[in-house]
Amino acid sequence: MSAEATNPATPGPVTPGAQRRRGRARLDLRRLGRAALLGSTTRDRLPDAIGHVAEAHRAHYPDADLEPLRRAYVLAESSHRGQMRKSGEPYITHPLAVTLILAQLGAEITTLTASLLHDTVEDTEVTLDQVRAEFGDDVCYLVDGVTKLEKVDYGAAAEPETFRKMLVATGNDVRVMSIKLADRLHNMRTLGVMRPEKQVRIAKVTRDVLIPLAERLGVQALKTELEDLVFAILHPEEYAEVKAMITANAEAEADSLGDIAGEVRGVLREAGIAAEVLIRPRHFVSVHRVHRKRGELRASDYGRLLVLVTEDADCYGVLGELHTCFTPVVSEFKDFIAVPKFNLYQSLHTAVARPDGEVAEVLIRTHQMHQVAEAGVVALRHPYASPTEESAEGADDERVDPTRPGWLSRLLDWQRAAPDSDTFWSTLREDLAQDREIAVFRPDGGTLGLPAGASCVDAAYAQYGEDAHACIGARVNGRLATLSTVLRDGDTVQLLMGQDTASGPSRDWLDHARTPAARIAIRRWLSTHPAPAPAPSGQTRKAPVAAPRPEAAEIPRPAANAVVDREGASVRLAGCCTPVPPDAITAFAVRGGAVTVHRVECPSVERMKEVGRAEVGVRWVDTAECRVTLTAESFGRAHLLADLTEAIALEGVAIISATVEPPTQQRVRHTYTLQLPDAGHLPGLMRAMRAVPGVYDVSRAQHPAAAAH
């Protein structure tokens, strides 16, 4: 049972009281234990033992009905009666402490009820059917999920499969993970009696998986304290050094951050902006990071200013006043209100300097944003209060939560797609190790959350799932881009999809994929579509070439279907612009008595005039056939040449010649000289060529160099 990891009598290192967040007081477990044993359990009043929980919950929900809490406590206390923690305290003190943590974060009554009962099914005679009958389906669902998490073996050998089971157990309900994180925090707070090697093992698992999960779920209040507790166990010397620095700063007479806070209050008061200005001390790990980055710390580096306002617009009003009355540090400005982080976080970040050189970092947010910043998904209240038809009718009772963070949605999707536990584990660790995400925009205004360094390949799989196999390219900020293009925060990405649903990714896509969803999908496709075996040594494998149309080889090169005002002159159509009726045309005499016909807008026309070449009158004759050169721009893929030539042939057009340039950056240029039975066929031919998957543009040839005669 989870109690074996705790001993309140000899607690592990904890954050000093000066660094604690408001509303996160530690419980006196001995007093709580006595209350659990002696407190009232009548139906007329709440048991004394859960008074702390009720008070914390009412701070967020003043009109809450606390009857479910009373009944849950009575069941939990009677079920755990006689069970003791290693410290000698009644076991009920553990679920009480976990529930208090969640109540302080603003969890709703269903989560708190399940938290009180979270160990009953695992450690007592209580069954899930009893929980369902007494408290309903939602509480039963959460208790069942947490029970499955409690059965996870955190041993190194079991990690790949057990953590996959952990995510499956979480299901689509983030409240299961919220209870688990609060459970781990309470056990980490009281880890002192464990053997040192076991403390280290538990701390490493907390560091590698549970802390990143808390970060991605936005539960900063849990994440920061877990970081400090892990830091104390895994790096005791550095922890002691940071603790001494924080203590020395707290005892110093100068309080530059307090002075700046007073000045900020005055500025906002004069501006008529109602705001609460608080000093937010940095936690131990944050101080350690700043110290490693900057060296010796200033007094203002030990905390940040937090400005809380009522409306979103007030956040920008505060920002304007601060940047007007102080010197802003431009490089420190970030707007997470306009573009929230992947884990729901919203805030304005800035830093301002006084004339004496003191710099203060400032966080600006509304009270609601602050609640979400601290509690993340816990602050979502009750996401299942109004079930959708999807959740009511979904297969296997799968829940659909439209409010859960996109990262968790993607995580649940790709853990199901992972072919084996080792793949799941390695990709999970890679994903959790990425500490920064970017937001890119779709053309419809939606956003995609991706890790920093992600490419268009990642964007394709994030938006289309396995349908992204047919992706042929992208437009980034309106410009054509290859799938290997690395995206930046704020880019707009339009994915270009081919029409060939049988096409698939190339192996080099793996070199550009950063997200688990993309890598797993690509590997799975490649494993079911093995590449052809290489040719035997000394032999060369020839690429298949579409067979030419028999009639194409027999078509003689006809005279140009244009006549010029120069008797006896031979007429030919310029290869640089390949004019066809009814193009506006002009002509110039060239060496050998010939006359070359150009489209009027051809770049070669201006050069001919600049060197003094005289124009020759020219007009089209009444004939049907014409010759034209077209250039097709495409993304490289297998069988593209065959598909293009087939599309041309189906239009009844003969191919006189064709050239394909070597691919560069996954792009290929094809140039075709074609004999059309009628110039009127040209628009339809170009549309047919553009419709070939992989082709993104078809145009009339424009090769100025070809005009030199």
Image (cartoon, grey):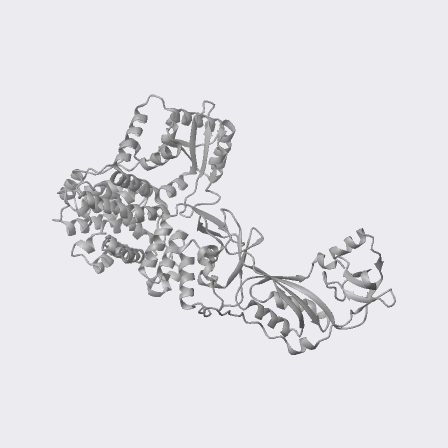
Can residue 314 be seen?
Answer: no
Q: Please determine whether, in this image, residue 259 is positioned above or below residue 344.
A: above
Q: Quadrant of the C terminus?
A: bottom right
Residue 559 in the figure: left or right of residue 159: right
The location of residue 505, given as percent across then percent down, is 47, 63
Task: Please state which of residues 191 and 45 is positioned toward the viewer in this rendering.
Answer: 191
Q: Does the image show residue 701?
A: yes
- Position of 648 compared to 328: left or right? right
The outermost residue toward the front is 538
Furthest residue in direction right, as rendered: 567
Q: Position of residue 524 (x, y in %)?
A: 40, 64
Toward which corner of the image does residue 51 lie, by quadrant?
A: top left
Counting labels gives 0
Residue nearer the viewer, 501 or 614: 614
- Residue drawn where x is 44% and y is 51% of the image: 450
Q: Nearer the viewer, residue 401 or 341?
A: 341
In-front residue for pair 226/457: 457
* 67 horizontally vs 650: left or right: left
**Quarter of the rendering containing residue 303:** top left
Q: Residue at x 47, y 48 (%)?
A: 439
Residue 180: percent from left, percent from top: 27, 49
**Going by the picture, which residue comes out furthest to the top?**
253
Horizontal and vertical percent for residue 5? Answer: 19, 46
Above or below: residue 328 compared with residue 413: above
